[in-house]
Amino acid sequence: MKYHVWEVVENNFSVEENYKNETLFALGNGYLGTRGTLEEGYSGPKGTGLEGTYINGFFETETIRYGEIAYGFPEKSQTMLNVANGKKIRVFAEDEEFNMLTGTVENYSRVLDMKNGTLKRSLIWRSPKGRTLKIDIERIVPLSHKHLAMIRYEIRPLGQDLKLQIISSLDGDVTNLTVENDPRVGSGLQGRALEMETIRTRDGFGLLRQKTKNSGQTIVSSMENILETTCSFECKSFNETYSAHTVYDINAKADEPILLTKYLVYATSHDYAVEILEPKTEELLRSAVKEGYESIKSEHIKFLDEFWKKADIEIKGDPSLQQGIRFNLFHLLQSAGRDGRTSLAAKGLTGEGYEGHYFWDTEIFAMPFFTYTNPEISKQLLKYRHSILDKSRDEARTLAHPKGAKFPWRTIAGEECSAYYPAGTAQYHINADIAYTVDRYVWATEDFDFLINYGAEILFETARVWVDVGAYIPACGNKFCINGVTGPDEYTAVVDNNCYTNMMARENLYCAVKAAEWMKENAPEEYKRLASRINLEENELKEWKRAADEMYIPYEESTGIYPQDDSFLRKKPWDFANTPKEKYPLLLHFHPLVIYRHQVCKQADLVLALFLLGEHFTFEEKKINYDFYEPLTTHDSSLSTCIFSIVASEIGYYKKAYDYFMCTARMDLDDHKGNTKNGVHTANMGGTWMCIVNGFAGMRINNDTLCFNPYLPEQWEGYSFRLTFKNRQIQVTVEKEFTTYELLEGSPIKLFHCGKELLLSTSLKEKTRNQADIM
Amino acid sequence: MKYHVWEVVENNFSVEENYKNETLFALGNGYLGTRGTLEEGYSGPKGTGLEGTYINGFFETETIRYGEIAYGFPEKSQTMLNVANGKKIRVFAEDEEFNMLTGTVENYSRVLDMKNGTLKRSLIWRSPKGRTLKIDIERIVPLSHKHLAMIRYEIRPLGQDLKLQIISSLDGDVTNLTVENDPRVGSGLQGRALEMETIRTRDGFGLLRQKTKNSGQTIVSSMENILETTCSFECKSFNETYSAHTVYDINAKADEPILLTKYLVYATSHDYAVEILEPKTEELLRSAVKEGYESIKSEHIKFLDEFWKKADIEIKGDPSLQQGIRFNLFHLLQSAGRDGRTSLAAKGLTGEGYEGHYFWDTEIFAMPFFTYTNPEISKQLLKYRHSILDKSRDEARTLAHPKGAKFPWRTIAGEECSAYYPAGTAQYHINADIAYTVDRYVWATEDFDFLINYGAEILFETARVWVDVGAYIPACGNKFCINGVTGPDEYTAVVDNNCYTNMMARENLYCAVKAAEWMKENAPEEYKRLASRINLEENELKEWKRAADEMYIPYEESTGIYPQDDSFLRKKPWDFANTPKEKYPLLLHFHPLVIYRHQVCKQADLVLALFLLGEHFTFEEKKINYDFYEPLTTHDSSLSTCIFSIVASEIGYYKKAYDYFMCTARMDLDDHKGNTKNGVHTANMGGTWMCIVNGFAGMRINNDTLCFNPYLPEQWEGYSFRLTFKNRQIQVTVEKEFTTYELLEGSPIKLFHCGKELLLSTSLKEKTRNQADIM
């Protein structure tokens, strides 16, 4: 099999691969996403495909029904909506309709071009009655144009004149996938969520205004079609209840090209006031048509060039991984909201899994990539968190915390939407995860404006919850204990003193104190204003510091093991030997009580702390704990293998590091989890980047300084990547014996290579011998 | 206020009291129950009353919807159905309809006669236009006639002739109360659950055959009306879609009585094959009419006489408590299924709270009363548990236990119906509670036939689950630990080594071993057959004994405290000082996570072990642990105060014992919990009996021998009760200085009074000085 390092290529269309490939070929720009479905529609068996177009942050709510409800359970769901399908273009050759599953398809290829951000499909279709069409389609969701998608559809009849009919539609008759028994797949949303308010058509043009039944959000979808051909044709338009159509009847001449350019613009009531939503949408549409396909495409490519310049990772010696990494980074970019009002969903904008919710995945798994390559995107993602502070304050009150904010475990608009609190609301660590990411962003970028205007408030409000949720417990030597929360590992729920949580909470508390001290020193007026606005009292800072200083960290002296929580070492071992493969993931085959009772982990938990808070562990402790937790971990979560890879790299388990990396790099391309059809795994995609940068290259920030400890996996000839750090751009190239650091932009900067300090200046390219293998 | 020691009397009908009093005045016979609603219907404001007639074990199912489902969650609900209302009798005087809320009501009384098991209502109604009717109604649900209810309705117009119309109906247009946000109140069952299959009427007679939509159960309800009067009248019948009516048009003469006797018979497809259900019902109805009201009433009273002879508790010196106790015992009798296929619901047959489910309440709270007064009823209740063993085996498999049976936390037909597992399925202790009750029943009755045919299988199958759910944990000295279960206290969920659970599991294991040894010795053939049927191997007995011998019992040497579980002593204290009254019960005002994180108990947990397994604690330990847990307990559960009263009695906290007893004895009569409207609290009713017998009289079974340690609450002059034990009947009378034991039936028996052995023989009445107060 040939791997294209900048492309994903399909040369045979098959029903078996269709559903998954719809996800792989999805396009998006952080606002608008659309699955890689076929313009003409798909006629394969039920359950082998899913039409889908999504707007980040646009959702419907429904009352969540509980078998047995309790106080404080979230009342409303939020489900990212499947919105009007504007890709729809049907083609009739005389009395035969083009369809990938009838007649024969030759010279077929479908190519996702990750360098240029295009999806192209080319084929020659021979109809059952022997008519032949050459079809070439290009689709773009421009990263440079928030509300826009474009399709360029070229047909030519081969060898004979034909009466050709093209019906280009905007189809608002859409529903979401309803799957009630697996929360990872779909939602419980039933039937049509969007009600029709307006439908307008004129030749080439169509517009739908639709409104959600419950959440009261409005969306306007619109299309403009431009047909270019030397053949004569007629154009008319019509609409049905839920859809607008433009019909072209063309006297197509043999081998003569017919080119349809379709512009789609979507906008919602989140973007513009409802009163001006229609005219604004039309304005955007007109402006796109005026600018024209090619011009927009160049801007889009320019945007991508800039992106790749900062973000690309090059691997020498393994095109399959090279392709996997680029695929992952490309999809991360496509998924990330960049307007400060939206974030990055677990499945991006590529499918309906997890209902389009944002989790901690964004901060802990996806954002390091952005923070160190395209920090502006991190900033927007963190501004989103700031924008939901008020709702998080409400949630903190629901959870009986008199002060502070408790971020939702899963949400779109800020309200907690987790309907199973033991693996949802109970994951208080999300507060610390966000705080950690705020702190890392601020110091990696020195974006102190952000700290002053957004970050500090997040740090303070999250810190406030920790001091209330925990307590100084006499039976634990008056240490500060945090009881009754769930850590990252969802196979252990609602425990006391989850080690990861306690350590991250401590970090959160110290970062809050640090931010307050920094502001008092550097922005005293702003600090006063903020403190006054959130009623922050001076003694709270002392409380934060005291709780952090006295934080209880579970640790077993005799073995050097950091127990995942107070109960973990006293659990019954899981009988791995007698658990057949088909019983994984365990959560689909065992009652939570059975899983929770056993010593078994779904994912990295303490091992994640070994990475994120590595400075608090000795090298020996890292090994001991990795060795202890690894055999207990099923990696049933896609958030796990990347972390194990990184830590394995650090402790010199290079083979393991590489094997785990292999699970991450092509997880979706090779459908390792069997559920790529529901959408890509964005957290894992960020994990791939970390596997290389933090894993193989051993990048850490210690004392606000970049440190590297690189090695080259023996399967490769070399790899290189670029980092953005404190307004510098640095290129790192790792080869077998040497690593080269190059300062591409910015003033000289100190860094560490294998513990050795270097001063990197523009004129200097540091080439440094790699450390000998540790074991 | 005057308390009637054998009656509950209402002299004023009020809208405010109506809903609650419908519950108090409910009648039932363990099979059929009907709320104390008015024959003519109730026209008060919405939410101030609930019509209800229930058949024990007759239910509808619905798919349980979960916000987020996981493997093994129960799929179907079971809701005891509100069935056709046969009480309905409407009376029209000329153009005015009798109604308690129009015109004026004089000489009113409603009397629940607990000695005779009748509900009587008498009144003179003056209509808005000044017509006057004297109405006397008596209602009976005969304890002697399983399927039957009867109403005797007498009217006489006072002072003037009247055209009187009586419409007597059987109304199948019924629904259940839908309450989704408080599981204690109603169910999520929506709309009409019963579909009409047949409706038949003829003069006086009506019959409905209805079938549930989902559970496929059939019920036939029928009525026969007999009118006796010297006045001339016409009778006709008609029916509507869901109801059958008989109409009497009477030329009523002044002061001349008109007597309507109404017989109601209900039977379901649980009782008879569907094919013969209608003829069987009609046969039962005919037979009741033939036997006649008075004759049936005498049989019913005879049944009650027998009951009271064995069960009554007499208190001298406090008529209010006397009334409360009898009310409780009466309702227990009315609630208990006696057919071996049904049990005793949390609310009996008096309301829809908890959906008519059976919990551990039956075994631990209600059954001691039956076991020691009417053991035949206990036997039937335990046979019910045996009848659901297969379903409990299925549930054990769902919970990954390869052998054994896990009884459902809440159910009607045997399937687990708990839709919130942390306070449901996780309460594994129900297995041990049932086993404990089997063991106590067997040895209190010496009903070894029961042990051989039913009890042993229950003991073995429950024991099997314990050895699988627990494990020998190295970190706990290789003791046998039980992790990830919930104990009785529902304010702490899914914990490790709940002390109550571990101790009860140990008892379960020992009882299973004991039963196996007994059978091997005394019924070796039956043992072999049973062992072969359930594939019981000899080494399993050894495993049971070993796990019991090595059971981990949390205990803190330094303080003598038995921690409720591994985490309890390390929890944050609840801030009781700043929790206002209106924030109780906590579960309605705090998220479970908040409650679980704190040191706070909903109910007796370890304190219940102090009572049930008292022989394993020293007197000093009982005091220490009572003192520790009492201030942490909110008694938000109605299962709590009785247990605290009993233990307070034992450790000499007489004032507390009495105060807690006061909360139990009149809990429903005085509506202490504010929710008697949803049904009586049957567990608490059993608790009242235990407060006196086990509490004040200090009754325990030690080494298979009755032991007493009685005292007299200073507010009383004396109390007495009877016990059935090992085929003897013993009367115990406690007075200030002496206790008298009298053997009423059976051969001489040894017992202990304040540690002193007595041999009680028929000719002897032992009068023994009470022990001096302990403190």
Image (spheres, coloured by chain):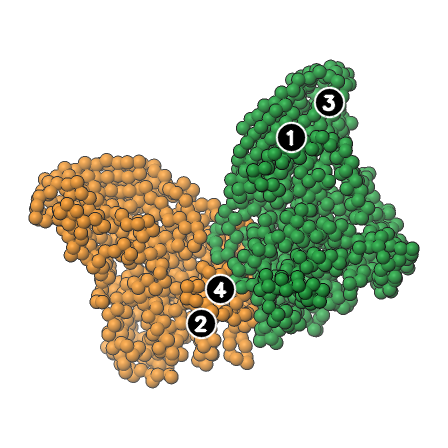
Chain colours: A orange, B green
Q: CA distance from mark 1 to mark 4?
A: 57 Å
Question: Relative to residue A660, is residue B467 drawn left or right?
Answer: right
The quadrant holding residue A194 is top left
Mark 4–mark 3 distance (CA, rounded to whole Å): 71 Å
Q: Earlier in the sequence, mark 2 or mark 4?
A: 4
Front tag of 2 and 3: 3
Identity of the amino acid at label 4? Tyr
Marks 4 and 1: in contact by CB < 8 Å?
A: no
Q: Are marks 2 and 1 on the same chain?
A: no
Protein chain holding label 1: B
How far apart are labels 3 and 1 at the CA level?
Answer: 16 Å
- Comparing marks 2 and 1, which lies closer to the viewer? 1
Q: Which residue is mark 4?
A: A491
Q: Which residue is mark 2?
A: A607
Which numbered tag is attached to residue B228?
3
Task: Give the residue drawn at x 62%, y 38%.
Answer: B267
Report the residue at 71% width, 16% height from top: B232
The residue mark sitting in front, 1 or 4, is 1
Cβ atoms under marks 4 and 3 closer than 8 Å: no
Q: Give the amino acid type for the residue marked by disc 1 in the picture.
A: Met
Front-lying residue, A45 or B98: A45
Residue A240 percent coordinates (x, y): 28, 36
The residue carrying pointer 4 sits among few (fewer than 14), some (14 to 19) or many (20 or more) residues within 10 Å by Cα, namely: many
Q: Quadrant of the C terminus of chain B?
A: bottom right
Mark 2 falls on what kind of element? Answer: helix
